Amino acid sequence: MVRLRSAQWYEGQDRNAYIHRAWMRRGVPDDAFTGRPQIAIANTASDLTPCNAHLDEVAASVRNGVYEAGGIPLDLPVVSLGETNVRPTAMLWRNMAAMATEEMLRANPVDGVVLLGGCDKTIPSLLMAAASVDLPAVVVPGGPMLNGTFRGSPLGCGTGVWKLSEEVRAGTLSQEQFLRSESAMIRSRGHCNTMGTASTMALVAEALGTVVPGVAGTPAPDSRLLEAAHHTGRLAVDMVAVDRRPGTFLTKGSFHNAIVALAAIGGSTNAVVHLLAIAGRLGVDLTLDDFDRIGSRVPVLVDLQPAGRFLMEDLHRAGGLLAVLREVRDLLDPEALTVTGEPLVTYLDDASIWDTEVIRTRAEPLVAEGGIAVLRGNLAPDGAVVKPAAASPHLLRHRGRAVVFDSIEDFRARIDDPDLDVDADSVLVLRGCGPKGYPGMPEVSNMPLPRKLLEQGVRDMVRVCDGRMSGTAYGTVVLHVAPEAAAGGPLALVRTGDVISLDVGARRIEVDVPADELARRTPDQATVDGYAAPRRGWERLYVDHVMQADTGADLDFLTGSSGFEVGRESH
């Protein structure tokens, strides 16, 4: 067994060891400080993060497992980011949450950590932290909420909001009915029940190897989640004993498997920036092009909203992620390991599909090639992404006249103007929404359509933006355009009336403006005025140091790992 890191605090008879032990006693036995692994439970529970509010109960089960296995469980509340509430966007603080968690794990006498997350940014930030501090770490996802229903049909959180709110704007749904759906949508604890970012990151974390295989996707109210949390607490103690740290088992092959899973489940585009950021903390050479090379031709097998019909509770009963991965086993890296020390593929032998409506077979996919497509061209020299499974097939190759908005405020002020010069073939362009420009790269890329077009029956248009979109959203949306407008990207130079050409098959996104003319253009003052200009605090630090979407939008000084060593004493 490896010498415990916590022994640096608790062993010995000097003044510092005395202080460390004495203040931590408070009822624990003497042997709590001699040879028993100290396991932090990094818990993102918060009443202001509604999707994670139940994680204290999950933490209690983890505690039982840790103690049963001979470890000492230690609650560690960490920064919690609720996607639905925080302004201007939760993504602004993902890197801060990762940095704070990393620093607290490094600073304290802990030997390993169980990471409890659920809402969109919590699992990514926890994994970024764990990768940088490189202590034995395992994730317990908080799980999706139960299915919602409204007017006799499945109602998916997030996706239902986008669809129903557009119906109200189109005049086909009353405001009263819209508000009545509110209590039907969120009917239990847990995160979004669609294949949004929360569900995506839980499943992708399992494919990456950081969750006990078979756990991700277990509904939050399901007692089997507490059972899994108990077992995970025991596993964390075992991981310390064999020194199984993220840096010892997360490889390029692990990310390969995560990308295959992302495509097969029809997952959120947000996973791209999160996986790139996690890889950057590990020093794994992952690029935007890897998502296209590995995942773009993978079939979508999960018929879940927003790309399909069902919800996460259905995926769990139909066989879960392992049943999905068994169908694409030949595309997986067979060497990539998991937190258990065993390769991911060894867990696929007993996986079965119990409902082929929810999980399609390889022979009858939902979408033949539905993975994330990476676009390049003079509008996105460093890349942009689109999710074909959520797009309208007839718009995947399209030419249209740009209608440009210089900020989200400009968009909201003009989109429903009956005199706006826009038609169904137009391309809506929104800029100033990237990491630097907003700041934080918000989920505004799935722009609501002009009211007058909704009233004509239009339900999708090509949209282009340097921001992100919710994983619960749908539509033909080109997003994560890099470089963003605020970083000098050509998106800042597009003018209303320019023709934009999209060809997803050819992986191109172009503005039909000669190169010399584009080079002569400068951004309009209205565009520049829309960029964020924070004077102090985290926003100032973020804007000064955030990198672009094509590398994961981490801060430039946070890439890489600092390890877990701390050289100096506190007294």
Image (cartoon, helix red, strand yellow):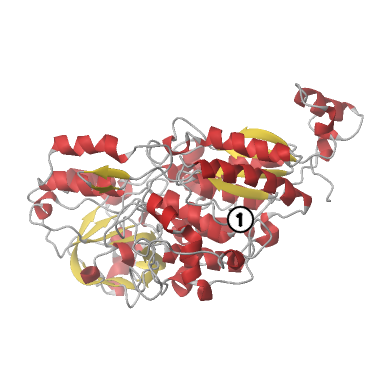
Q: Which residue is mark 1?
A: 281
Give 510 or 234, whichever is nearer the viewer.
234
496 to the left or right of 482 = left
Residue found at x 31% / y 43%: 148
Q: How many numbered marks have been drawn onto this rendered protein structure?
A: 1
Is 521 situated above or below 112?
Answer: below
- Given the current orientation, which residue lies at the most extreme top position? 26
349 to the left or right of 527 = right
Q: Is residue 460 visible?
A: yes
Identify the element where label 1 is drawn. Answer: helix
- Position in image of residue 87 (x %, y %): 38, 37
Q: Residues within 10 Å of mark 1 (few under 14, many from 20)?
A: many
Q: Is residue 435 visible?
A: no
Tell me where residue 379 sits by quadrant.
bottom left
Give 224 or 443, whichever is nearer the viewer.
224
Residue found at x 59% / y 69%: 253
Q: Of the residues shown, which amino acid type is indicated by label 1?
A: Arg
Tell me where residue 509 sits by quadrant.
bottom left
Residue found at x 45% / y 43%: 119
Location of the C terminus (image quadrant): top right
- Position in image of residue 95 (x %, y %): 53, 46
